[in-house]
Amino acid sequence: QVQLVESGGGLVQAGGSLRLSCAASGRTFSSYVMAWFRQAPGKEREFVASTSSRGIITSNADSVKGRFTISRDNAKNTVYLQMNSLKPEDTAVYYCAAGAMLRISQEERNYGYWGQGTQVTVSS
């Protein structure tokens, strides 16, 4: 069982930066693939980024490549999403997710644990 709590969201101007954090409970955090998804108003939830259990392999959605970076600190049971050069279209609720699998995935169905989400609003 894993419980996830996101933090770090807020209001930022276009071109600015934010760092989201996701703190996980449980002693097996280092065995989970971790990911960030987001859901904008009126749209379906979409994949943002994922990282392998040791943080060696990462994957980003095309829409955030070169701007967002996912990382994790297994000693702190925390995964991060550094967001730079933010755009108004990045406005969404951002969710942290954990999946018990061997490879990173962009598919929601592969992640069994989800946080409550944190709001990110980018003004133009």
Image (cartoon, grey):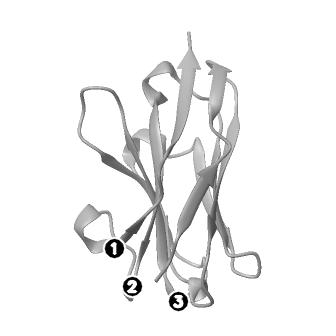
Q: According to the image, label 2 marks what residue?
A: 100
Real-space Cα separation, disc 1 to disc 3, in angstroms: 13 Å
Real-space Cα separation, disc 2 to disc 3, in angstroms: 7 Å
Q: Earlier in the sequence, mark 2 or mark 3?
A: 3
What residue occupies the far right of the structure in this picture? 75
The amino acid type of the residue labelled 1 equals Gly
Residue 107 appearing in the image: no
Q: According to the image, label 3 marks what residue?
A: 31
41 sits left or right of 51 in the view: left
In the depicted structure, whether residue 36 falls above or below residue 56: above
In the depicted structure, whether residue 49 falls above or below residue 24: above
Graded by Cα atoms within 10 Å as few (under 14), some (14 to 19) or many (20 or more), the crowding at tag 2 reads: some
Which quadrant of the figure contains the C terminus? top right
Residue 97, picture quadrant: bottom left
The amino acid type of the residue labelled 2 equals Ala
- Residue at 54% from the left image edge and 83% from the top image edge: 53
Mark 2 and mark 1 residues within 8 Å of each other at the beta carbon: yes
